[in-house]
Amino acid sequence: MSKLQPVRGTHDLLFEETAKHRLIESVSLGVAERFGFREIATPIFEFTDVFSRTLGETSDVVTKEMYTFETKGGESITLRPEGTAGIARAFISGGLAQQTPLKIFYRGPMFRHERPQKGRQRQFHQIGVELIGVAGPQADIEVISLASHILADLNLQGNVTLEINSLGDSETRAFYRDALFEYLSTRKDNLSTESQERLSRNPLRILDSKDPDDRKVLIDAPDLSDYLSKESQEFFAAVREGLAHRGISFLINSSLVRGLDYYGHTAFEFTTDAIGAQGTVLAGGRYDSLIEHMGGPPTPGIGWAAGIERLAMLLPSEMEPRRIIAAIPMSNDQELLVQSLANTLRKAGYIVDIGYSGNVGKRMKRADKIKAAVAIVVGSDEVKNESVVVRNLQSGDQQVVKQADLVQHFSFLK
Ligand code: ATP
Ligand code: MG
């Protein structure tokens, strides 16, 4: 038998944690629906090609981070490291191309074989959106605005900063890639080993490096914004203007590039310094060549994904208290009555906990432990009088309430 531990980089989400995940998912789905987005779910694994072709053969995700295995039938399968590739595949294979503009919301677990650390797991969870089929900057403004709206509804607006950049069109990037390659080639020896390898494959990715040696070399590197074509400049200006118009503040970060290939024009991230080194909570960008590259019709797209675990780290540790009623019989004789009172209250929408066993003292302790707001206690007198004793577990106050009045009595708990 294997060790009784979760696999490195994976976690059990226990009660408080699942509650945060559920809150993040339901708030974001609610906001997305108000923006006209609808949820879809693609499989958790796909043919490996789906990812290697969409994310780019040179991206970190494809070269180092994928969980790939061969099936008994000899097919190469990969656990999804992100959501966009599967959605682009579904767009092509599922005939969604007739339905543009498509506004999609998704959520679920993702898998990347990276070094686990704070805010970085091997199984993690994302919420994300894709807006497919709109070439103009309205789409960029809309999805960024949606992200900002979700963060505001989660009360996290004060904790995050929006950074944006333009990667320009493909000519812009080709031009810039050459200039950057030339600059970095003459300083190759000062780069980290990893970036030396990236230099010929994908020099743009070096801009993203957090290595201090790389950062030093990059200080005087040519600036992507100086290479933007006229159209790219206009596109970027329209995005900035649209964001400003919607009251969304942002910083321009000219070294912000997406970790994945096939991105152009707008790239953006919401970052925070409240959770340590892995400070990017939400990241996205425009991917106009991706669907065509996968073999579909030329179709523009833009989207983002947010790490649920990283967002959860920003939420307050004490979530809304659950308004629990503990139902306690004085002895076995009142057990059945307590159970039926509990069910009446549950039907009326209250959370009612029954301790199942033990004397009154033990059950009272349990009520405290689960942070119940009140206890209802039923003894032989109460059976006779068709009442219960209601004890407020914060103040210790007690009062007698008729059983028939209980549903009404507890309305303050809703
Ligand atoms: P990073 O720079 O942190 O590696 P990335 O560029 O690889 O991020 P994306 O592919 O843009 O990340 O994924 C979007 C979001 O998903 C990230 O901003 C982050 O919040 C979350 N995320 C990505 N990888 C992980 C991981 N291994 N563990 C937890 N969250 C992650
Ligand atoms: Mg990464």
Image (cartoon, helix red, strand yellow):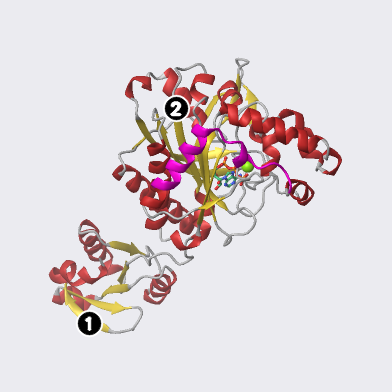
Q: Residues within 10 Å of mark 1 (few under 14, many from 20)?
A: few
Tell me the quadrant of ligand 1: top right
Q: Is residue 215 visible?
A: yes
Q: Amino acid at mark 1?
A: Gln
Q: Is residue 143 magenta?
A: no
Task: Mark 1 or mark 2: name the one nearer the start of the chain.
Answer: 2
Residue pointed to by mark 1 = 399
In this rendering, is residue 205 above or below 390?
Answer: above
Residue pointed to by mark 2 = 300
- Is residue 147 or residue 213 the one in the foreground? 213
Part of the protein shown in magenta:
220-242
Q: Residues within 10 Å of mark 2 (few under 14, many from 20)?
A: many
Q: Main secondary structure of the magenta part?
A: helix
In the rendering, at what x and y percent does residue 80 appear?
A: 55, 32
In the rendering, at what x and y percent does residue 382 appear?
A: 20, 76
Q: Is mark 2 within 8 Å of ligand 1?
A: no
In this rendering, is residue 382 above or below 139?
Answer: below
- Is residue 26 or residue 135 the one in the foreground? 135
- The part of the image, by quadrant, that contains residue 224 is top right
Q: From mark 1 to mark 2, how far is it between C-alphas? A: 65 Å
Q: Is residue 230 magenta?
A: yes
Viewport quadrant of the N terminus: top right
In the rendering, at what x and y percent does residue 327 appear?
A: 30, 68
Q: Amino acid at mark 2?
A: Pro
